[in-house]
Amino acid sequence: MVRSLLFATLIAGSVVSASLAIVSKSTAQEPAPPVNLSAQVDGELASVWRRDQIKPAPRSSDAEFLRRVYLDTTGATPSREEAAAFSSDPDTNRREKLIDALTSDPRFGRYMADIWTSIIVGRGAGQLNASDLFAVWMARRINEGAGFDAIIREVLTASGNLADTPAIAVYFKEGEARDLRDVAGKLTRVFSGVQIQCAQCHKHPYEKWTQADFSGMTSYFIGVQARVNNDLRPGLATAVDSGENLKRINDAVKKRSTLNKEQLEKLETLLPFTKPKTLNGVTPASSDPTTWRKDLAKWFTAAGNTQTPRYVVNRLFAIAFGRGLHEPVDDFNSLTSPSHPQLLEALTADFVANGWDLRRLYRALLKSDAWQLSSSGRDAKAQPSHFAAYPVRPLGPESFIASLVAFGDAAELGSAVKVARNKVFDDLRAEAARFEKNKEEGKLPANERRYVYDLESVAKYEKWVAEMPDAWLLRRTAAARYARLATDDEMAESESFTLSIDQALAVMNGAFTNKISMMGGDSLLARIFKETNDPAGRIKALYLGVLCREPSEAELSRALDWVKAPARAPKIYEDLMFALLMTTEFATNH
Protein backbone atom coordinates (compact mmCIF):
# COMPACT_ATOMS: atom_id res chain seq x y z
CA MET A 1 0.00 0.00 0.00
CA VAL A 2 1.24 3.47 -0.81
CA ARG A 3 1.63 5.55 2.32
CA SER A 4 0.16 9.04 2.28
CA LEU A 5 2.85 11.67 2.65
CA LEU A 6 0.62 13.75 4.88
CA PHE A 7 -0.22 10.80 7.07
CA ALA A 8 3.46 9.96 7.40
CA THR A 9 3.96 13.54 8.52
CA LEU A 10 1.01 13.56 10.89
CA ILE A 11 1.80 10.20 12.44
CA ALA A 12 5.58 10.23 12.41
CA GLY A 13 7.25 9.65 15.71
CA SER A 14 4.39 8.33 17.82
CA VAL A 15 6.13 6.12 20.34
CA VAL A 16 3.88 4.51 22.93
CA SER A 17 2.71 4.48 26.47
CA ALA A 18 0.21 4.72 29.15
CA SER A 19 -0.83 3.31 32.38
CA LEU A 20 -1.05 2.02 35.95
CA ALA A 21 -3.04 4.49 37.94
CA ILE A 22 -4.92 4.70 41.21
CA VAL A 23 -7.78 6.18 43.06
CA SER A 24 -10.22 8.52 41.39
CA LYS A 25 -11.50 11.83 42.71
CA SER A 26 -11.45 12.38 46.44
CA THR A 27 -14.67 12.74 48.35
CA ALA A 28 -13.11 15.52 50.41
CA GLN A 29 -15.07 18.74 49.88
CA GLU A 30 -12.33 21.14 50.96
CA PRO A 31 -8.82 20.18 49.82
CA ALA A 32 -5.98 21.18 52.11
CA PRO A 33 -4.27 24.43 51.10
CA PRO A 34 -1.14 23.83 49.00
CA VAL A 35 0.87 25.97 51.43
CA ASN A 36 0.55 23.20 54.01
CA LEU A 37 2.02 20.78 51.53
CA SER A 38 4.89 23.19 50.85
CA ALA A 39 5.67 23.28 54.55
CA GLN A 40 5.63 19.49 54.67
CA VAL A 41 8.17 19.35 51.84
CA ASP A 42 10.42 21.77 53.69
CA GLY A 43 10.01 19.97 57.01
CA GLU A 44 10.90 16.55 55.65
CA LEU A 45 13.93 17.84 53.72
CA ALA A 46 15.13 19.92 56.70
CA SER A 47 15.00 16.90 58.99
CA VAL A 48 17.43 15.07 56.69
CA TRP A 49 19.68 18.15 56.51
CA ARG A 50 19.85 18.17 60.32
CA ARG A 51 20.52 14.46 60.43
CA ASP A 52 23.36 14.69 57.91
CA GLN A 53 24.60 18.09 59.12
CA ILE A 54 23.99 19.73 55.77
CA LYS A 55 23.70 23.48 55.40
CA PRO A 56 21.23 24.44 52.65
CA ALA A 57 22.13 27.03 50.04
CA PRO A 58 20.83 30.56 50.61
CA ARG A 59 17.48 31.70 49.23
CA SER A 60 17.55 32.46 45.51
CA SER A 61 17.75 36.08 44.41
CA ASP A 62 14.72 37.58 42.70
CA ALA A 63 16.54 37.34 39.36
CA GLU A 64 17.27 33.64 39.90
CA PHE A 65 13.72 32.97 41.00
CA LEU A 66 12.14 34.87 38.12
CA ARG A 67 13.98 33.06 35.36
CA ARG A 68 13.58 29.69 37.06
CA VAL A 69 9.86 29.99 37.76
CA TYR A 70 9.07 30.92 34.17
CA LEU A 71 11.17 28.06 32.82
CA ASP A 72 9.57 25.58 35.24
CA THR A 73 5.98 26.62 34.51
CA THR A 74 5.86 27.96 30.95
CA GLY A 75 8.93 26.34 29.44
CA ALA A 76 10.44 29.68 28.43
CA THR A 77 12.24 32.61 30.02
CA PRO A 78 10.20 35.71 30.93
CA SER A 79 9.82 38.59 28.53
CA ARG A 80 11.29 41.92 29.56
CA GLU A 81 7.75 43.16 30.22
CA GLU A 82 7.02 40.22 32.51
CA ALA A 83 10.31 40.73 34.32
CA ALA A 84 9.57 44.42 34.79
CA ALA A 85 6.09 43.67 36.17
CA PHE A 86 7.53 41.31 38.77
CA SER A 87 10.31 43.70 39.74
CA SER A 88 7.91 46.59 40.23
CA ASP A 89 5.40 44.61 42.32
CA PRO A 90 5.68 45.86 45.94
CA ASP A 91 3.73 42.90 47.38
CA THR A 92 5.83 40.89 49.84
CA ASN A 93 4.04 37.75 48.59
CA ARG A 94 4.82 38.46 44.95
CA ARG A 95 6.62 35.13 44.50
CA GLU A 96 3.58 33.16 45.63
CA LYS A 97 1.33 35.37 43.50
CA LEU A 98 3.45 34.75 40.42
CA ILE A 99 3.50 30.99 41.00
CA ASP A 100 -0.30 31.00 41.28
CA ALA A 101 -0.62 33.07 38.11
CA LEU A 102 1.79 31.00 36.04
CA THR A 103 0.38 27.62 37.06
CA SER A 104 -3.06 28.95 36.07
CA ASP A 105 -1.76 30.21 32.72
CA PRO A 106 -2.53 28.15 29.56
CA ARG A 107 1.23 28.00 28.99
CA PHE A 108 1.48 25.73 32.04
CA GLY A 109 -0.65 23.05 30.38
CA ARG A 110 1.45 23.30 27.22
CA TYR A 111 4.68 22.99 29.20
CA MET A 112 3.41 19.93 31.05
CA ALA A 113 2.11 18.50 27.78
CA ASP A 114 5.55 18.91 26.20
CA ILE A 115 7.13 16.93 29.02
CA TRP A 116 4.52 14.19 29.28
CA THR A 117 4.15 13.84 25.51
CA SER A 118 7.88 13.25 25.09
CA ILE A 119 7.64 10.58 27.81
CA ILE A 120 4.45 8.90 26.61
CA VAL A 121 4.51 9.31 22.82
CA GLY A 122 7.81 10.85 21.79
CA ARG A 123 8.47 14.09 19.94
CA GLY A 124 7.77 12.87 16.44
CA ALA A 125 9.27 14.42 13.35
CA GLY A 126 8.17 16.76 10.62
CA GLN A 127 6.18 19.95 10.55
CA LEU A 128 3.01 18.26 11.82
CA ASN A 129 2.75 14.84 13.44
CA ALA A 130 0.68 12.70 15.77
CA SER A 131 2.87 13.77 18.68
CA ASP A 132 1.75 17.37 18.17
CA LEU A 133 -1.91 16.37 18.14
CA PHE A 134 -1.38 14.33 21.31
CA ALA A 135 0.32 17.32 22.95
CA VAL A 136 -2.61 19.60 22.06
CA TRP A 137 -5.02 17.09 23.56
CA MET A 138 -2.88 16.67 26.69
CA ALA A 139 -2.52 20.44 27.18
CA ARG A 140 -6.26 20.89 26.81
CA ARG A 141 -7.00 18.25 29.44
CA ILE A 142 -4.45 19.65 31.91
CA ASN A 143 -5.66 23.22 31.44
CA GLU A 144 -9.23 22.03 31.94
CA GLY A 145 -8.17 20.73 35.35
CA ALA A 146 -8.61 17.03 34.60
CA GLY A 147 -7.17 14.73 37.22
CA PHE A 148 -4.16 12.80 35.98
CA ASP A 149 -5.92 9.55 36.80
CA ALA A 150 -8.60 10.48 34.28
CA ILE A 151 -5.93 11.33 31.70
CA ILE A 152 -4.28 7.95 32.22
CA ARG A 153 -7.60 6.15 31.81
CA GLU A 154 -8.37 8.10 28.66
CA VAL A 155 -5.02 7.18 27.13
CA LEU A 156 -5.39 3.53 28.17
CA THR A 157 -8.86 3.15 26.67
CA ALA A 158 -8.54 5.56 23.71
CA SER A 159 -10.54 4.37 20.74
CA GLY A 160 -11.35 5.79 17.32
CA ASN A 161 -9.27 7.61 14.74
CA LEU A 162 -6.45 10.07 15.14
CA ALA A 163 -8.42 13.01 13.76
CA ASP A 164 -11.05 12.63 16.50
CA THR A 165 -8.99 11.06 19.30
CA PRO A 166 -5.28 12.03 19.37
CA ALA A 167 -4.76 9.83 22.44
CA ILE A 168 -4.62 6.78 20.13
CA ALA A 169 -1.20 8.05 18.98
CA VAL A 170 0.30 5.74 21.61
CA TYR A 171 -0.47 2.78 19.34
CA PHE A 172 1.55 4.04 16.38
CA LYS A 173 5.13 4.87 15.47
CA GLU A 174 6.45 6.36 12.23
CA GLY A 175 3.13 5.81 10.48
CA GLU A 176 2.78 2.14 11.44
CA ALA A 177 0.90 0.29 14.16
CA ARG A 178 3.16 -0.66 17.06
CA ASP A 179 3.69 -4.17 18.34
CA LEU A 180 1.30 -4.56 21.30
CA ARG A 181 4.10 -6.10 23.36
CA ASP A 182 5.97 -2.83 23.08
CA VAL A 183 2.81 -0.97 24.04
CA ALA A 184 2.30 -3.00 27.20
CA GLY A 185 5.92 -2.72 28.33
CA LYS A 186 6.24 0.99 27.79
CA LEU A 187 2.82 1.90 29.19
CA THR A 188 3.59 0.09 32.39
CA ARG A 189 6.93 1.87 32.71
CA VAL A 190 5.90 5.43 31.89
CA PHE A 191 2.79 5.45 34.08
CA SER A 192 3.88 3.28 36.98
CA GLY A 193 7.68 3.19 36.98
CA VAL A 194 7.57 -0.62 36.86
CA GLN A 195 9.76 -2.09 34.14
CA ILE A 196 8.26 -5.38 33.03
CA GLN A 197 9.66 -5.23 29.49
CA CYS A 198 12.78 -7.06 30.70
CA ALA A 199 10.57 -10.11 31.30
CA GLN A 200 9.36 -10.33 27.71
CA CYS A 201 11.75 -13.13 26.71
CA HIS A 202 12.84 -14.52 30.08
CA LYS A 203 12.38 -14.00 33.79
CA HIS A 204 13.44 -10.52 34.86
CA PRO A 205 17.16 -10.75 35.75
CA TYR A 206 16.78 -9.28 39.24
CA GLU A 207 13.06 -8.76 39.88
CA LYS A 208 10.16 -11.11 40.53
CA TRP A 209 8.51 -10.46 37.14
CA THR A 210 8.23 -13.49 34.89
CA GLN A 211 7.30 -14.00 31.26
CA ALA A 212 3.83 -14.89 32.50
CA ASP A 213 3.55 -11.49 34.18
CA PHE A 214 4.59 -9.74 30.97
CA SER A 215 2.22 -11.87 28.89
CA GLY A 216 -0.63 -11.25 31.30
CA MET A 217 -0.28 -7.47 30.99
CA THR A 218 0.14 -7.62 27.21
CA SER A 219 -2.98 -9.78 26.89
CA TYR A 220 -5.14 -6.85 27.95
CA PHE A 221 -4.29 -5.22 24.60
CA ILE A 222 -4.99 -8.28 22.41
CA GLY A 223 -8.39 -6.79 21.58
CA VAL A 224 -6.90 -3.59 20.14
CA GLN A 225 -7.07 -3.35 16.37
CA ALA A 226 -4.57 -0.63 15.44
CA ARG A 227 -4.49 -0.02 11.72
CA VAL A 228 -3.47 2.53 9.11
CA ASN A 229 -5.62 2.88 6.00
CA ASN A 230 -3.32 4.31 3.36
CA ASP A 231 -6.01 4.20 0.69
CA LEU A 232 -7.40 7.26 2.43
CA ARG A 233 -5.49 10.50 1.98
CA PRO A 234 -4.46 11.55 4.55
CA GLY A 235 -3.88 8.02 5.78
CA LEU A 236 -6.30 7.19 8.57
CA ALA A 237 -4.98 5.69 11.82
CA THR A 238 -7.56 3.90 13.93
CA ALA A 239 -7.40 1.94 17.17
CA VAL A 240 -10.58 0.18 18.25
CA ASP A 241 -11.55 -2.68 20.54
CA SER A 242 -12.30 -5.84 18.58
CA GLY A 243 -12.49 -9.58 19.12
CA GLU A 244 -10.86 -10.25 15.75
CA ASN A 245 -7.35 -11.04 17.01
CA LEU A 246 -8.55 -13.46 19.68
CA LYS A 247 -10.98 -15.11 17.27
CA ARG A 248 -8.18 -15.77 14.76
CA ILE A 249 -6.02 -17.30 17.48
CA ASN A 250 -8.85 -19.51 18.78
CA ASP A 251 -9.68 -20.62 15.23
CA ALA A 252 -6.03 -21.53 14.68
CA VAL A 253 -6.03 -23.59 17.89
CA LYS A 254 -9.00 -25.58 16.57
CA LYS A 255 -7.17 -26.20 13.29
CA ARG A 256 -3.79 -26.87 14.89
CA SER A 257 -3.37 -30.25 13.19
CA THR A 258 -3.67 -28.65 9.75
CA LEU A 259 -1.15 -25.86 10.32
CA ASN A 260 2.31 -25.87 8.78
CA LYS A 261 5.48 -25.34 10.81
CA GLU A 262 5.57 -21.58 10.29
CA GLN A 263 1.91 -21.21 11.27
CA LEU A 264 2.40 -23.37 14.36
CA GLU A 265 5.38 -21.26 15.47
CA LYS A 266 3.34 -18.08 15.07
CA LEU A 267 0.45 -19.60 17.02
CA GLU A 268 2.75 -20.61 19.88
CA THR A 269 4.09 -17.05 19.95
CA LEU A 270 0.60 -15.54 20.23
CA LEU A 271 -1.05 -18.01 22.64
CA PRO A 272 0.54 -16.53 25.81
CA PHE A 273 -1.14 -13.20 25.02
CA THR A 274 -4.68 -14.51 25.37
CA LYS A 275 -4.74 -14.74 29.16
CA PRO A 276 -4.99 -11.27 30.73
CA LYS A 277 -3.75 -10.99 34.29
CA THR A 278 -2.58 -7.95 36.24
CA LEU A 279 0.72 -7.85 38.07
CA ASN A 280 -1.03 -8.86 41.29
CA GLY A 281 -2.95 -11.70 39.69
CA VAL A 282 -6.35 -10.12 38.99
CA THR A 283 -8.13 -11.44 35.88
CA PRO A 284 -11.06 -9.83 33.99
CA ALA A 285 -14.58 -11.00 34.78
CA SER A 286 -15.54 -11.24 31.11
CA SER A 287 -14.04 -13.32 28.31
CA ASP A 288 -14.88 -10.52 25.86
CA PRO A 289 -11.55 -8.92 24.80
CA THR A 290 -13.29 -5.70 23.82
CA THR A 291 -13.78 -4.98 27.54
CA TRP A 292 -10.29 -5.84 28.74
CA ARG A 293 -8.68 -2.41 28.35
CA LYS A 294 -11.45 -0.90 30.47
CA ASP A 295 -10.82 -3.58 33.10
CA LEU A 296 -7.13 -2.75 33.06
CA ALA A 297 -7.88 0.96 33.44
CA LYS A 298 -10.09 0.21 36.45
CA TRP A 299 -7.34 -1.84 38.01
CA PHE A 300 -4.77 0.87 37.37
CA THR A 301 -7.00 3.42 39.06
CA ALA A 302 -8.13 1.24 41.95
CA ALA A 303 -7.69 2.50 45.50
CA GLY A 304 -5.44 -0.41 46.39
CA ASN A 305 -2.94 0.22 43.57
CA THR A 306 -0.69 2.88 45.07
CA GLN A 307 2.23 2.48 42.69
CA THR A 308 0.90 4.69 39.89
CA PRO A 309 0.27 7.85 41.94
CA ARG A 310 3.58 7.27 43.72
CA TYR A 311 5.32 7.24 40.35
CA VAL A 312 3.42 10.28 39.01
CA VAL A 313 4.25 12.27 42.16
CA ASN A 314 7.89 11.22 41.88
CA ARG A 315 7.96 12.30 38.23
CA LEU A 316 6.44 15.70 39.11
CA PHE A 317 8.98 16.15 41.87
CA ALA A 318 11.72 15.40 39.36
CA ILE A 319 10.30 17.94 36.91
CA ALA A 320 10.42 20.60 39.62
CA PHE A 321 13.65 19.63 41.42
CA GLY A 322 15.71 18.04 38.67
CA ARG A 323 15.62 14.54 40.20
CA GLY A 324 13.04 12.40 41.91
CA LEU A 325 12.67 11.32 45.51
CA HIS A 326 13.19 7.89 43.98
CA GLU A 327 15.88 7.34 41.34
CA PRO A 328 15.79 6.24 38.60
CA VAL A 329 12.48 8.04 38.18
CA ASP A 330 10.95 5.30 36.04
CA ASP A 331 12.46 2.21 37.64
CA PHE A 332 10.97 1.30 41.01
CA ASN A 333 12.61 -2.00 41.87
CA SER A 334 13.75 -4.08 44.83
CA LEU A 335 17.31 -2.73 44.65
CA THR A 336 16.39 0.95 44.96
CA SER A 337 14.54 2.99 47.55
CA PRO A 338 13.42 6.61 47.96
CA SER A 339 15.81 9.12 49.49
CA HIS A 340 12.89 10.53 51.50
CA PRO A 341 10.34 7.72 51.79
CA GLN A 342 8.04 9.49 54.25
CA LEU A 343 7.85 12.57 52.05
CA LEU A 344 7.07 10.51 48.95
CA GLU A 345 4.27 8.68 50.75
CA ALA A 346 2.86 11.91 52.21
CA LEU A 347 2.85 13.65 48.82
CA THR A 348 1.25 10.60 47.21
CA ALA A 349 -1.52 10.44 49.80
CA ASP A 350 -2.24 14.14 49.36
CA PHE A 351 -2.18 13.82 45.56
CA VAL A 352 -4.75 11.03 45.56
CA ALA A 353 -6.91 12.72 48.20
CA ASN A 354 -7.08 15.84 46.05
CA GLY A 355 -8.13 14.26 42.78
CA TRP A 356 -4.72 13.72 41.19
CA ASP A 357 -4.44 17.45 40.62
CA LEU A 358 -1.10 18.11 38.87
CA ARG A 359 -1.42 21.87 39.18
CA ARG A 360 -2.08 21.80 42.92
CA LEU A 361 0.86 19.55 43.73
CA TYR A 362 3.26 21.32 41.39
CA ARG A 363 2.24 24.71 42.75
CA ALA A 364 2.96 23.50 46.29
CA LEU A 365 6.40 22.19 45.27
CA LEU A 366 7.34 25.55 43.72
CA LYS A 367 6.18 27.43 46.80
CA SER A 368 8.46 25.41 49.04
CA ASP A 369 11.56 27.09 50.46
CA ALA A 370 13.61 24.17 49.12
CA TRP A 371 12.65 24.82 45.50
CA GLN A 372 13.50 28.50 45.96
CA LEU A 373 17.03 27.86 47.20
CA SER A 374 19.88 29.29 45.16
CA SER A 375 21.87 27.07 42.82
CA SER A 376 25.09 28.52 44.24
CA GLY A 377 26.43 28.19 47.77
CA ARG A 378 25.95 24.44 47.91
CA ASP A 379 27.36 22.66 50.99
CA ALA A 380 30.34 20.57 49.87
CA LYS A 381 28.97 17.62 51.88
CA ALA A 382 25.56 17.76 50.22
CA GLN A 383 24.59 15.10 47.70
CA PRO A 384 22.02 15.73 44.93
CA SER A 385 19.53 13.63 46.91
CA HIS A 386 19.68 16.15 49.76
CA PHE A 387 17.94 18.80 47.62
CA ALA A 388 19.96 21.38 49.56
CA ALA A 389 20.38 23.64 46.51
CA TYR A 390 18.59 24.08 43.24
CA PRO A 391 20.43 21.97 40.63
CA VAL A 392 22.04 23.46 37.55
CA ARG A 393 20.53 21.44 34.72
CA PRO A 394 20.36 21.67 30.93
CA LEU A 395 17.20 23.14 29.50
CA GLY A 396 14.87 20.68 27.84
CA PRO A 397 14.81 20.96 24.04
CA GLU A 398 11.45 22.76 23.99
CA SER A 399 12.57 25.25 26.65
CA PHE A 400 15.87 25.92 24.92
CA ILE A 401 14.18 26.63 21.60
CA ALA A 402 11.38 28.68 23.20
CA SER A 403 13.87 30.87 25.05
CA LEU A 404 15.99 31.29 21.94
CA VAL A 405 13.29 32.26 19.45
CA ALA A 406 11.72 34.73 21.88
CA PHE A 407 14.48 37.16 20.97
CA GLY A 408 13.57 37.23 17.28
CA ASP A 409 10.95 39.17 15.38
CA ALA A 410 7.73 37.59 16.68
CA ALA A 411 5.66 38.70 13.68
CA GLU A 412 8.20 37.39 11.18
CA LEU A 413 8.59 34.05 12.96
CA GLY A 414 4.84 33.73 13.37
CA SER A 415 4.29 34.37 9.68
CA ALA A 416 6.85 31.73 8.73
CA VAL A 417 5.18 29.20 11.05
CA LYS A 418 1.73 29.93 9.61
CA VAL A 419 2.98 29.47 6.05
CA ALA A 420 4.63 26.17 6.88
CA ARG A 421 1.67 25.00 8.95
CA ASN A 422 -0.92 25.81 6.29
CA LYS A 423 1.15 24.50 3.39
CA VAL A 424 0.64 20.88 4.47
CA PHE A 425 -3.13 21.25 4.34
CA ASP A 426 -3.20 23.54 1.30
CA ASP A 427 -1.02 21.11 -0.65
CA LEU A 428 -3.31 18.23 0.24
CA ARG A 429 -6.42 20.14 -0.91
CA ALA A 430 -4.67 21.03 -4.16
CA GLU A 431 -3.70 17.38 -4.59
CA ALA A 432 -7.34 16.36 -4.01
CA ALA A 433 -8.51 18.86 -6.60
CA ARG A 434 -6.01 17.53 -9.17
CA PHE A 435 -7.08 13.98 -8.30
CA GLU A 436 -10.76 14.75 -8.95
CA LYS A 437 -9.94 16.54 -12.20
CA ASN A 438 -7.82 13.67 -13.47
CA LYS A 439 -10.49 11.22 -12.37
CA GLU A 440 -13.16 13.03 -14.37
CA GLU A 441 -10.90 13.12 -17.41
CA GLY A 442 -9.92 9.47 -17.05
CA LYS A 443 -6.24 10.30 -16.55
CA LEU A 444 -5.70 8.65 -13.15
CA PRO A 445 -2.73 6.24 -12.98
CA ALA A 446 -3.79 2.72 -12.07
CA ASN A 447 -1.94 2.80 -8.73
CA GLU A 448 -3.92 5.87 -7.63
CA ARG A 449 -7.44 4.79 -8.55
CA ARG A 450 -8.05 3.25 -5.14
CA TYR A 451 -7.46 6.53 -3.29
CA VAL A 452 -10.20 8.42 -1.49
CA TYR A 453 -9.48 11.95 -0.29
CA ASP A 454 -10.82 12.52 3.20
CA LEU A 455 -11.04 16.30 3.42
CA GLU A 456 -13.27 16.03 6.49
CA SER A 457 -10.35 14.54 8.42
CA VAL A 458 -8.07 17.23 7.04
CA ALA A 459 -10.39 19.85 8.55
CA LYS A 460 -10.29 18.03 11.88
CA TYR A 461 -6.48 17.93 11.85
CA GLU A 462 -6.45 21.64 11.13
CA LYS A 463 -8.76 22.31 14.05
CA TRP A 464 -6.43 20.51 16.46
CA VAL A 465 -3.37 22.26 15.12
CA ALA A 466 -5.15 25.63 15.27
CA GLU A 467 -5.07 25.28 19.07
CA MET A 468 -1.28 25.52 18.91
CA PRO A 469 0.02 29.09 19.19
CA ASP A 470 2.73 29.74 16.63
CA ALA A 471 5.48 29.87 19.26
CA TRP A 472 4.45 26.50 20.66
CA LEU A 473 4.39 24.78 17.28
CA LEU A 474 7.73 26.32 16.39
CA ARG A 475 9.42 25.14 19.58
CA ARG A 476 7.99 21.63 19.28
CA THR A 477 9.05 21.28 15.64
CA ALA A 478 12.58 22.55 16.28
CA ALA A 479 12.92 20.62 19.56
CA ALA A 480 12.16 17.34 17.79
CA ARG A 481 15.02 18.03 15.42
CA TYR A 482 17.48 18.87 18.20
CA ALA A 483 16.42 15.94 20.38
CA ARG A 484 17.15 13.55 17.53
CA LEU A 485 20.69 14.89 17.35
CA ALA A 486 21.26 13.20 20.72
CA THR A 487 19.82 9.75 20.03
CA ASP A 488 21.55 6.86 21.74
CA ASP A 489 22.76 3.57 20.29
CA GLU A 490 19.19 2.26 20.32
CA MET A 491 17.96 5.38 18.50
CA ALA A 492 16.05 6.58 21.56
CA GLU A 493 15.79 10.35 21.49
CA SER A 494 17.13 12.48 24.31
CA GLU A 495 14.66 13.82 26.87
CA SER A 496 16.84 16.90 27.43
CA PHE A 497 19.02 19.33 25.54
CA THR A 498 22.28 17.65 26.51
CA LEU A 499 24.54 19.96 24.52
CA SER A 500 26.07 17.06 22.64
CA ILE A 501 28.62 17.96 19.97
CA ASP A 502 25.98 17.69 17.25
CA GLN A 503 23.53 19.81 19.22
CA ALA A 504 26.13 22.44 20.07
CA LEU A 505 27.19 22.72 16.43
CA ALA A 506 23.57 22.97 15.32
CA VAL A 507 23.03 25.87 17.72
CA MET A 508 26.25 27.68 16.91
CA ASN A 509 25.75 27.35 13.16
CA GLY A 510 21.98 27.25 13.09
CA ALA A 511 19.80 29.68 11.21
CA PHE A 512 17.78 30.40 14.38
CA THR A 513 20.76 31.57 16.38
CA ASN A 514 22.32 33.61 13.62
CA LYS A 515 19.03 35.24 12.67
CA ILE A 516 17.95 35.98 16.24
CA SER A 517 21.24 37.58 17.26
CA MET A 518 20.98 40.11 14.42
CA MET A 519 19.47 43.57 14.36
CA GLY A 520 16.61 43.04 11.91
CA GLY A 521 12.90 43.73 12.28
CA ASP A 522 11.42 43.75 15.75
CA SER A 523 14.14 41.62 17.33
CA LEU A 524 15.28 42.12 20.93
CA LEU A 525 18.41 43.90 19.76
CA ALA A 526 16.45 46.21 17.45
CA ARG A 527 14.09 47.17 20.27
CA ILE A 528 17.00 47.88 22.62
CA PHE A 529 18.63 50.18 20.04
CA LYS A 530 15.39 52.12 19.66
CA GLU A 531 15.05 52.54 23.43
CA THR A 532 18.47 53.98 24.25
CA ASN A 533 21.66 55.34 22.70
CA ASP A 534 23.68 54.74 25.87
CA PRO A 535 26.18 51.85 25.42
CA ALA A 536 25.94 50.89 29.11
CA GLY A 537 22.15 50.98 28.92
CA ARG A 538 22.17 48.77 25.84
CA ILE A 539 24.50 46.26 27.45
CA LYS A 540 22.40 46.09 30.61
CA ALA A 541 19.22 45.66 28.59
CA LEU A 542 20.85 42.89 26.57
CA TYR A 543 21.93 41.01 29.70
CA LEU A 544 18.47 41.41 31.19
CA GLY A 545 16.81 40.22 28.00
CA VAL A 546 19.03 37.17 27.46
CA LEU A 547 20.13 36.11 30.96
CA CYS A 548 17.41 37.81 33.06
CA ARG A 549 19.99 39.63 35.14
CA GLU A 550 22.15 42.73 34.96
CA PRO A 551 25.85 42.34 34.15
CA SER A 552 28.36 42.42 36.98
CA GLU A 553 30.67 45.42 37.14
CA ALA A 554 33.46 43.39 35.55
CA GLU A 555 31.16 42.15 32.76
CA LEU A 556 29.88 45.65 32.08
CA SER A 557 33.39 47.12 31.99
CA ARG A 558 34.63 44.41 29.63
CA ALA A 559 31.62 44.81 27.35
CA LEU A 560 31.99 48.61 27.29
CA ASP A 561 35.61 48.25 26.22
CA TRP A 562 34.47 45.89 23.51
CA VAL A 563 31.80 48.16 22.01
CA LYS A 564 33.87 51.36 22.03
CA ALA A 565 34.54 51.31 18.29
CA PRO A 566 31.47 53.14 16.86
CA ALA A 567 32.29 52.00 13.34
CA ARG A 568 31.49 48.44 14.33
CA ALA A 569 28.09 49.19 15.84
CA PRO A 570 25.60 47.57 15.68
CA LYS A 571 27.64 44.55 14.53
CA ILE A 572 29.57 44.49 17.79
CA TYR A 573 26.30 44.25 19.76
CA GLU A 574 25.20 41.35 17.56
CA ASP A 575 28.47 39.62 18.45
CA LEU A 576 27.84 40.31 22.13
CA MET A 577 24.34 38.87 21.96
CA PHE A 578 25.58 35.78 20.10
CA ALA A 579 28.23 35.31 22.81
CA LEU A 580 25.56 35.47 25.54
CA LEU A 581 23.43 32.93 23.70
CA MET A 582 26.40 30.55 23.58
CA THR A 583 26.93 30.57 27.36
CA THR A 584 26.05 27.64 29.58
CA GLU A 585 24.24 30.17 31.76
CA PHE A 586 21.70 30.65 28.98
CA ALA A 587 21.52 26.92 28.15
CA THR A 588 20.82 25.83 31.74
CA ASN A 589 18.13 26.25 34.35
CA HIS A 590 19.65 27.29 37.67
Image (spheres, grey):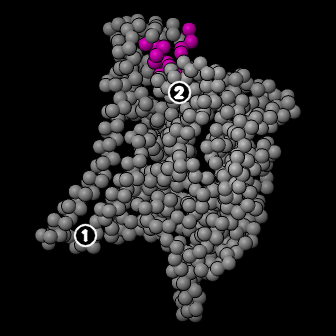
Quadrant into which the C terminus falls? top right
Q: Relative to 211, does residue 84 appear above or below in the rendering?
A: above
Which residue sits furthest right?
A: 51
Label 1: few (<14), some or many (≥20) within 10 Å? Answer: few
Report the amino acid beneath label 1: Glu
Label 1: which secondary element: helix
Quadrant of the rendered image containing residue 300: bottom right
Q: What residue appears at the point 55 percent right and 35 percent down from the top-left corner?
A: 102
Q: What residue appears at the point 70 percent right and 46 percent down from the top-left corner?
A: 31
Which residue sits furthest front?
A: 29
Magenta stretch: includes residue 404: no
Q: What residue appears at the point 51 percent right and 80 percent down from the top-left corner?
A: 244
Residue 194 shows up from this direction: no
Q: Relative to 255, does residue 248 appear above or below in the rendering?
A: above
On the image, the x and y values in percent for residue 289 come to 58, 77
Report the amino acid beneath label 2: Phe
On the image, the x and y values in percent for residue 151 come to 58, 56
Label 2: which secondary element: helix
The prevailing secondary structure element of the residues shown in magenta is helix
Which residue is more in the foreground, 264 or 470?
470
On the image, the x and y values in percent for residue 402 come to 46, 35
- Give, as a single range, the part of the protein colored magenta: 538-554
Q: Which residue is mark 2?
A: 586
N-terminal label among 1 and 2? 1
Quadrant into which the N terminus falls? bottom left
Q: Which residue is mark 1?
A: 448
